Image (tube, rainbow, N blue to C red):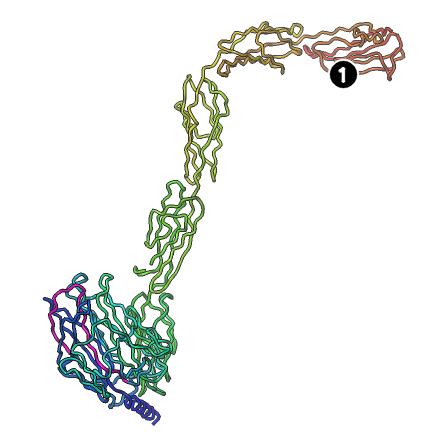
């Protein structure tokens, strides 16, 4: 009984619509190229067959214009018959009333149209729409125009236009999601693009039809209708606020049409009649050929208490193989899902909002049955496209040197091969961006760490991955000379001052046939001449720089050092050594005697103060500043001598015999003591250079005889000696 009440309520709603309905409710025109410039024109017209006035045209006149709007011809297309469109509703649980009627007339006719620049326009115009339509102004006196374009020979030859596959349901339930396949087919396989568009207006309520029977007027009109239809372009319907091209009828969520598939979805939320315009645009190689604009009338009615199976259209394409299903079904008590996964028979669920993980990417048909097995069950299907989870990734290429760098990148991640790969290398790269999957030859203009962003955009999903690439700096090779002059066979040392971001390795070309890998190499040059010196430095990253010594290295001749010594073996008692200069080609001469003293004259006599073996070095320079060195040795032998006076005169202060001390040669472990006549020690020293000045405790001692004691070891035999004697202090 409850279900029967719903049917009665729905039937009363239809009666309300019927009482105000009249005229045309939709249509379209399309053509097929049959060859030899022959085209088969097809016109589909839909009218309210209970209250529509007048009936379908017989014949229906399709007018042909060129691209300038000039009338070419008209086709009188006879009506071969019509049929009643089943009064479908978007819910199989309801039985639509039998007194609601939509009549379909399908006209076809052949016409020969030779190629013409700009092509041809086909148009059919009719009055009028139902006065009860809610979303346009003055619907009762607003007609319809259906038009097609045959492109000119500059675009294509023998084109066939797209045509729609299905007519929308005559009734749709308020508050029930609508999922309608509004797709079209194209015989040529051209690319199709769908969108909402403004319907054209047509004839008004005075001129209901054209052609030889023109002049059929109503509502007291006395206008004489034209023999031909008006030429394109045509005006659009006037939308009643708040409706417009993109929001053509009251619905929440708003009605949308998928631009690729033509799937129309939305949930109407207001009872009434609505005119909706949808266009399918035909493209070939990116060039627009034709647009099939179809408008039709939706009748939105109340459907209280009806079970409606509704699963939302897929909107998330970025979550990988796992899909979380929800449903918007009405009056559902139980559920049965089939996820359409052909890899298993377990792809079903009986819960309201299940989850399923697909084994692979692909296109799957998902079926939802609500109240399965009950009298009033409902079924709905939806297509889900499953794509791998986007996971963009790339392995950052190894760092390169800034000089001559060229980086290749290889993007990876889950994608199906039709993804706006997008690379962003930053402002220091050339090119700075790329849309290739594997871009190559990316050059960076400076050293440093640079962020590289790789983005995959596919199926409305965007995912990015960022890593960095390192560009190593070029080192700076630089060197000079430690040695101020370069002379034959004299060592020349090079001074490196190169800079790098890591420790450097070195490769020297020394110009004399030798190379070196040390930082500051030393080499000699065998002959006078000019030599080219170069250095290559390399960082640990392999970055190189090369430099050469400015100009050529000039190598000059050297003088010849030489000298004679006499004697070369002598006693400390005869320590005078005479040098005679025997150098050649020298302009200066320096001698170093080996005892810390030196002279800039190489013809002189030098006295040694201590015995020993001394290495004598002679350094000579020529006019070019090149040196040479000669060496020799002399021996000053040890001798032992002791002598001491027996009196001294400290009071005279004449510088002669003022201090009492012995003369010693070749001694060590020396000690010198003075005693007065009473045995009191009045002086002591261990320095052979120190003597007694005759004072004791700050006063000059009296004239008298004093006792001395001297103890030492000789240097010759290391024998201990002790001398005790007397000395007279005289005033």
Q: Nearer the viewer, residue 499 or 102?
A: 102
Query: Where does the magenta region start and end?
Result: 107-130
Q: Residue 134, can we see it?
A: yes
The residue drawn where x is 31% and y is 61% is 416
Farthest residue, direction bottom: 1
Q: Nearer the viewer, residue 564 or 711?
A: 564
Asked whether residue 576 is drawn in magenta, I would say no
Q: Residue 90, can we see it?
A: no
Which residue is tagged 1? Answer: 686
Question: Picture quarter containing residue 661?
Answer: top right
Q: Is residue 232 above or below residue 418?
A: below
Q: Give the position of the C terminus as an image quadrant.
A: top right
Q: Give the position of the N terminus as an image quadrant.
A: bottom left
Q: Position of residue 13 (x, y in %)?
A: 32, 89
The residue drawn where x is 35% and y is 67% is 317
Q: Position of residue 727 (x, y in %)?
A: 83, 7
Question: Picture quarter containing residue 254?
Answer: bottom left
| Disc 1 secondary structure class | loop
Asked whether residue 120 is drawn in magenta, I would say yes
The residue drawn where x is 39% and y is 23% is 513
Q: Position of residue 326 (x, y in %)?
A: 38, 75
């Amino acid at each position: 009984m409850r279900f029967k009440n719903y049917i009665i309520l729905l039937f009363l709603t239809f009666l309300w619509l019927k009482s105000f309905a009249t005229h045309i409710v939709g249509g379209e025109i399309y053509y097929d190229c049959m060859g030899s410039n022959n085209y088969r024109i097809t016109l589909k017209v839909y009218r309210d067959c209970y209250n529509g006035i007048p009936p379908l045209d017989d014949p229906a006149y399709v007018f042909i214009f060129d691209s300038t709007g000039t009338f070419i011809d008209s086709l009188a297309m006879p009506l071969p018959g019509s049929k009643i469109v089943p009064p479908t509703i978007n819910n199989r649980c309801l039985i639509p009333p039998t007194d609601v009627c939509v009549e379909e007339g399908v006209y076809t006719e052949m016409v020969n149209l030779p190629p013409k620049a700009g092509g041809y326009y086909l148009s059919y115009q009719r009055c009028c729409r139902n006065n009860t339509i809610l979303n346009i102004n003055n619907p009762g006196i607003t007609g319809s125009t259906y038009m097609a374009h045959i492109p000119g020979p500059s675009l294509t030859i023998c084109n066939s236009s797209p045509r729609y596959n299905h007519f929308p349901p005559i009734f749709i339930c308020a508050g029930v999601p609508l999922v309608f396949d509004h797709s079209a087919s194209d015989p040529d396989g051209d690319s199709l693009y769908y969108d909402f568009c403004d319907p054209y207006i047509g004839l008004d309520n005075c001129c209901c039809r054209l052609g030889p029977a023109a002049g059929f007027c109503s509502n007291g009109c006395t206008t004489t209708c034209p023999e031909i239809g008006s030429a394109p372009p045509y005006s659009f319907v006037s939308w009643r606020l708040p409706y417009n091209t993109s929001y053509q009828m009251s619905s929440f969520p708003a009605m949308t049409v998928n631009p690729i598939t033509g799937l129309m979805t939305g949930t109407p939320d207001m009872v009434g009649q609505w005119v909706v315009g949808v266009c399918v645009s035909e493209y070939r190689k990116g060039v627009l050929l034709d647009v099939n604009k179809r408008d039709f009338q939706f009748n939105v009615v109340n459907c209280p208490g009806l079970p409606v199976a509704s699963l939302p259209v897929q909107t998330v394409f970025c979550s990988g193989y796992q899909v979380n299903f929800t449903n918007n079904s009405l009056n559902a008590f139980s559920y049965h899902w089939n996820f359409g996964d052909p890899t298993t028979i377990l792809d079903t669920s009986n819960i309201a909002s299940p989850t399923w993980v697909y084994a692979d990417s692909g296109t799957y048909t998902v079926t939802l049955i609500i109240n399965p097995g009950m009298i009033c069950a409902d079924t709905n299907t939806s297509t889900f496209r499953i794509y791998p989870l986007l996971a963009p990734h790339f392995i950052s290429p190894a760092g390169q040197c800034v000089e001559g760098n060229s980086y290749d990148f290889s993007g990876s991640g889950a994608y199906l091969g039709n993804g706006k790969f997008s690379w962003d290398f930053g402002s220091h790269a050339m090119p700075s961006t790329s849309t290739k999957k594997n871009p190559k030859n990316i050059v960076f203009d400076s050293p440093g760490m640079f962020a590289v962003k790789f983005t995959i955009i596919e199926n409305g999903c965007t995912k990015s991955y960022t890593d960095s690439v390192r560009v190593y700096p070029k080192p700076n090779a630089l060197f000079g000379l430690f040695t101020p002059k370069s002379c034959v066979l004299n060592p020349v040392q090079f001074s490196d001052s190169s800079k790098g971001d890591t420790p450097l390795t070195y490769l020297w070309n020394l110009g004399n046939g030798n190379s070196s890998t040390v930082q500051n190499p030393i080499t000699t040059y065998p002959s006078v001449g000019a030599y080219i010196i170069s250095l290559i430095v390399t960082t640990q990253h392999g970055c190189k720089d090369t430099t050469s010594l400015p100009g050529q290295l000039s190598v000059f001749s050297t003088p010849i050092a030489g000298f004679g010594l006499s004697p070369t073996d002598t006693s400390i008692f005869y320590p005078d050594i005479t040098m005679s200069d025997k150098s050649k080609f020298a302009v200066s001469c320096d001698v170093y005697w080996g005892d810390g003293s030196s002279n800039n004259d190489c013809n002189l006599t030098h006295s040694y103060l201590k015995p020993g073996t001394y290495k004598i070095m002679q350094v000579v320079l020529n006019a070019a500043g090149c040196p040479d060195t000669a060496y020799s040795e002399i021996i000053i032998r040890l001798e032992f001598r002791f002598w001491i006076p027996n009196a001294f005169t400290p009071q005279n202060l004449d510088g002669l015999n003022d201090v009492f001390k012995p003369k010693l040669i070749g001694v060590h472990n020396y000690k010198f003591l003075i005693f007065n006549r009473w045995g009191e020690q009045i002086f002591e020293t261990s320095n052979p250079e120190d003597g007694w000045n005759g004072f004791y405790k700050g006063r000059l001692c009296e004239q008298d005889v004093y006792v001395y004691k001297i103890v030492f070891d000789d240097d010759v035999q290391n024998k201990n000696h002790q001398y005790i004697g007397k000395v007279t202090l005289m005033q």
